[in-house]
Amino acid sequence: MEQIPSRLNGVDRIGLNILAALFSHARISKVQMSAQVGVSASRCYERMRHLEQGKIIRGYHADIDIARLASCMQFLVQIKLLNYTGAHSKRFEKAVLKIAEIVSCQSVLGHIDYVIVVVAASVEKYQEVIAKLRASSDNEFDFVTFPISKTIKSSGQSDLREIVGALMRDEASPG
């Protein structure tokens, strides 16, 4: 069996092929996956469960165009907490988790603290979501809003093997 790069957290070639198949097509059957990966369906299922237990597979999702489904707008929002503390960030994150219109949130490094994506029927409804976030997080924050005009690429539209290959090349190259 080939050597496992340290960056892949114990995932070998077969595990990576299973992940790549799921990454590009979450509804793939175990039989189709076994043919694609080269191991039996029962072995694929066993390997998937191991990847789930290791929290490498976090869930199975459909890539749904919410804007098309609900005829809504999407907003990318950069957020900077004022008077940042660990306690403030935890309260903010708990508030984010409770607001359905916030469909994505990443904690980031740099001059801002978070990037969120909000869906809303209108600019006015978006402003209501931000007001609700302010009230429920009990934190003061500054924010910059970017209305999203078009999604060019979403996470499931890439080949996982190509992503991992690029990361491994980056890790191996000096610099």
Image (cartoon, helix red, strand yellow):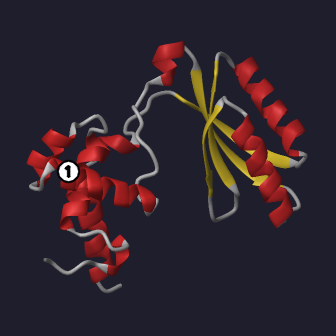
Please state if 20 lies on the left or on the right of 61 as rendered: left
- The percent coordinates of residue 15 (x first, y second) are 25, 61
Please state if 64 lies on the left or on the right of 140 as rendered: left
Q: Residue at x 67, y 30 (%)?
A: 100
Residue 168, above or below 140 = below
* The quadrant where residue 1 appears: bottom left
Residue 107, above or below 118 = below
Disc 1: which residue: 42
- The percent coordinates of residue 52 (x first, y second) are 41, 55
* Residue 84 in view in this figure: no
Dot 1, how many residues are within 10 Å of its Cα: few (below 14), some (14-19), or many (20+)?
few
Residue 71, above or below 126 = above
Q: Nearer the viewer, residue 79 or 21?
A: 21
* Residue 154 in view in this figure: yes
Q: Residue at x 28, y 82 (%)?
A: 173
Q: Residue at x 85, y 58 (%)?
A: 88
Q: Secondary structure at mark 1?
A: helix
- The percent coordinates of residue 137 (x first, y second) are 85, 44
- The percent coordinates of residue 146 (x first, y second) are 62, 36
What kind of residue is marked 1? Ser
